[in-house]
Amino acid sequence: MINAFRVIWKTAKSIWEDMLLLVLMNALTFLCALPAAIAVYFALSLAPNALLAFAFSLVVLIPTTIPFAGAWAALNATCNRVANGFAISWEFFFTNFKQYIWKWWRYVVFSLAVFGLLALNFVWYPTVFGDEPWVAWVQGAWLAAIAFWVSMQFYVFPFYIEQETKSWKVAVRNAALVAGANPLFTLVLVALAAALTAVALLVVPPVFVLLGWLFWAMTGNEAVINRIQAFRNRLETEQKKKQPQAPKRNDPLS
């Protein structure tokens, strides 16, 4: 719990130190996400039922998330650089935009598809089976799966940036391990990040344009660096315990 609040404090401090550039980069990411948001809005409005709404949304998301994927990759790479104490620039942002746009686009579509399928199952059971007593239990299981998948995405993108050899499979595995091994830490961070993002989006939209995506990305990167450092510290402690201590020499003057 304490470590989670330390991450939040470090996130606020990191954003404050590079506020101008980060806010502008967040605004650009917001603009890149608009095509996907508009397309999904019309898909949901025109679809006659939940199944078709899911199908239409997935179809329109495939092409419209391309610019967002590049901006999301660049924003995460920039946040990772800030979290590690390095300087940032527009050149760094656009270099990562071009380098990762297609790799991140494929994973973003996959991630959204998994989330959509989980959400569809959550809605489908009560729609088909009504008020059956077991439906609430099944919905609870699907809701837990949705929460775990969202928690994993909180870590996946920062883990991918941290890797020397890039691999989505390794990033997903590490994200699942961290989310599963640190449930309270993850719950506090994801709940706070999601709550602040939702408040910014629904109550004060201009704040979301300036900080919405940025706060989520920076918190995720700070959390991953925090967990990696904790893991390294634990390994060092275990190694010191395993190493035999050198026998003390007798002091001839004693």
Image (cartoon, rainbow, N blue to C red):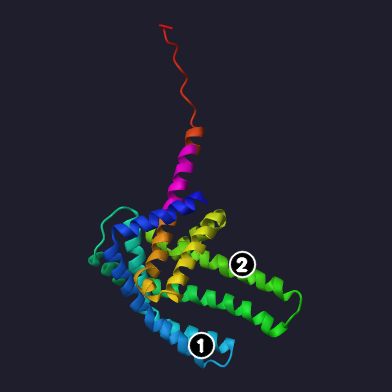
Give the overall secondary structure of the magenta segment.
helix
Quadrant housing residue 201: bottom left
Above or below for 167 versus 233: below
- Which of the marked residues, 2 or 1, is nearer the chain's N terminus? 1
Q: Residues within 10 Å of mark 1 (few under 14, many from 20)?
A: some
Callout 1, which amino acid?
Leu
Q: Residues within 10 Å of mark 2 (few under 14, many from 20)?
A: few
Above or below for 86 versus 240: below
Q: Is residue 178 left or right of residue 37?
A: right
- Residue 176: x %, y % from top left: 53, 60
Q: Report the magenta residues as a range.
A: 224-237
Residue 170 is at least partly visible in this image:
yes
Location of mark 1 (residue) = 44
Q: Is residue 88 left or right of residue 35?
A: left
Location of mark 2 (residue) = 144
Q: Is residue 57 magenta?
A: no
- Residue 237: x %, y % from top left: 48, 38
